[in-house]
Image (tube, helix red, strand yellow):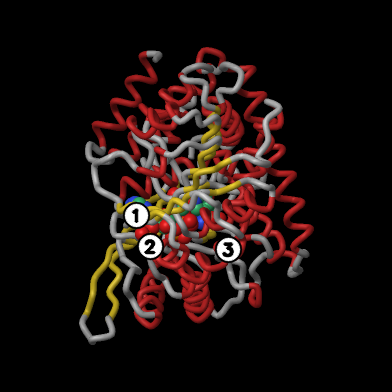
Amino acid sequence: MHSQIEELYQMVCRRDPYEREFHQAVHTFLLSIDKIIDELPEVTYHKVLERMTEPERVIMFRVPWMDDEGRLQINRGFRVQMSSAIGPYKGGLRLHPSVNLSIMKFLAFEQVFKNSLTGLPMGGGKGGSDFNPKGKSDAEVMRFCQSFMTELFRHIGPDTDVPAGDIGVGAREIGYLFGQYKRLTNSFVGVLTGKGQDFGGSFIRPEATGYGLVYLSQAILADKKMDLEGSTCLVSGSGNVAQYTTEKLISLGAKVVTMSDSSGMIYDESGITSEKLAFVKTLKNVKRGRIKEYADKYGCTYIERVEDTPNPVWDIKADYAFPCATQNEILKADAENLVKNKVKLVGEGANMPCSMEAESILTGNGVLLAPAKAANAGGVAVSGLEMAQNSMRIKWTPEHVDSELKNIMGNIYRNISEAAETYSTKDNFIDGANIAGFLKVSRAMIAQGYV
Ligand code: NDP
Ligand code: 2IT
């Protein structure tokens, strides 16, 4: 690493010593940028990297809400507005007990470059709360969302900051958040994406992250004369991204044999069929149950998750693996298992699912790695298309949105593979995505002066 970049990284760590996830996201990114910094004296001169690693604005607030027993509950709310260099802040909201400023900043940081890769005019942000939606009634979730929005509304807007879903935030939560924003501002505008189909939501937004992940993986494999058809695939998670990744894989003739949640995993050797996937969707999206019920119903293997041991999802023989649950779900031992099991491609549906050690084990052993910034960009890309439809007050057909999504994922693949070849090494898609995402944001920042 150049000393100037090493010093910047040390400064980021010193400044916020407890923000482990943010350090990790910055570190992987800087390792890529290190390869081009000599060719870009203007980046050094204008302190572009120093500015990129410090959010434009962080909003942190109290979220009081009343539970069904009439007790007051207090959570912490966040919105990290990382960069508005190429468009309004854009990125999801996460509701999970693990949420803290480090996780919000890592997600907002990665979002900046992901959004840049989509080719659409969107800056980067992320938000959420340590509220745990598990076991809460609809009424409790609604009261929480209303209280959260009662503070957030003054910081967002269709031309300022447009939140969407992430872990724990789907159609139900976006509906409640949208309703409260409308009530507080007396305006019906595209301030959130992932809305219901009846009030401004785009077709294919629920499917977009999973479908996009498969489209990008397909493009990578096609170049290697490999195919999804007839392959065996591992999927982790059983939420939005996992469900639609599985759906698209099945439709392309692949056999998906695993899904999981934070309690455990199912291993269905005969393959998850469309009918079984429909069961998972109802189980997770409507009944809000656990994946174990799949094993109970279909009589397949269920393995309970044991903390601090290798994740059993990654210890099954397969061709391709799609982590779609959360950050750092593939650690060193998991990466070694994937290599041992001869997995040929890892497509990152989740954000930062691989630790840095895992990344280098995978790429060092010739596993193709489709990094999150590129691989899961389909979700925010269709969010961008939802914003466009809202501004024009029109609604495109599912076929139209899906074909736009395919085009965008194809362009992302071309951009990251070209950037990899030009600035790094062929098939180093991590460098390709970081560099291609970075260059546009950097040019925009320099053009806009010191802000
Ligand atoms: P959901 O809430 O719909 O599903 C999350 C899934 O991951 C659940 O099965 C959940 O299990 C599991 N999970 C969550 N946290 C943990 C944890 N700490 N340990 C183990 N399992 C966990 O979220 P999404 O599907 O929307 O998001 C999944 C990933 O994809 C996240 O990394 C998100 O940032 C990323 N992503 C999402 C996009 C979107 O459009 N929704 C777009 C791009 C990326 P359990 O129910 O037990 O908690
Ligand atoms: O991580 C992500 O890209 C998302 N959670 C989706 C963000 C969005 O604005 O659609």
Q: Is residue 419 left or right of residue 242?
A: right
Label number found at residue 374: none
Crowdedness near tag 2: few (<14), some (14–19) or many (≥20) residues, C-alpha within 10 Å: some
**Amino acid, disc 2:** Lys
- The foreground one among 7 and 46 is 7
Residue 20 in which image quadrant: top left
Check disc 1 and report its element: helix, strand or loop: strand
CB atoms of marks 2 and 1 within 8 Å: yes
Observer-side mark, 3 or 2, equals 2
Q: Which residue corresponds to the image point at 61% horizontal and 56% vertical from the top-left?
A: 247
Q: Can you say which quadrant of the picture contains the N terminus?
A: top left
Is 64 drawn above or below residue 273 in the view shown? below
* Gap between marks 1 and 3 measured at Cα: 31 Å
* Gap between marks 2 and 1 measured at Cα: 7 Å
Q: Does the image show residue 379? A: no
Observer-side mark, 1 or 3, equals 1
For disc 1, the marked residue is 264
Q: Position of residue 335 (x, y in %)?
A: 40, 31
Q: Which residue corresponds to the image point at 49% horizontal and 69% vertical from the top-left?
A: 285
Label number found at residue 193: 3
> Is ligand 2 less than 8 Å from the beta carbon at label 3?
yes
Check disc 3 and report its element: helix, strand or loop: loop
Q: Earlier in the sequence, mark 1 or mark 3?
A: 3
For disc 2, the marked residue is 292
CB atoms of marks 1 and 3 within 8 Å: no
Check disc 2 and report its element: helix, strand or loop: helix
> Is ligand 1 less than 8 Å from the beta carbon at label 1?
no
Is 221 drawn above or below residue 271 in the view shown? above
Q: Position of residue 436 (x, y in %)?
A: 60, 30
Q: Is residue 421 left or right of residue 27?
A: right
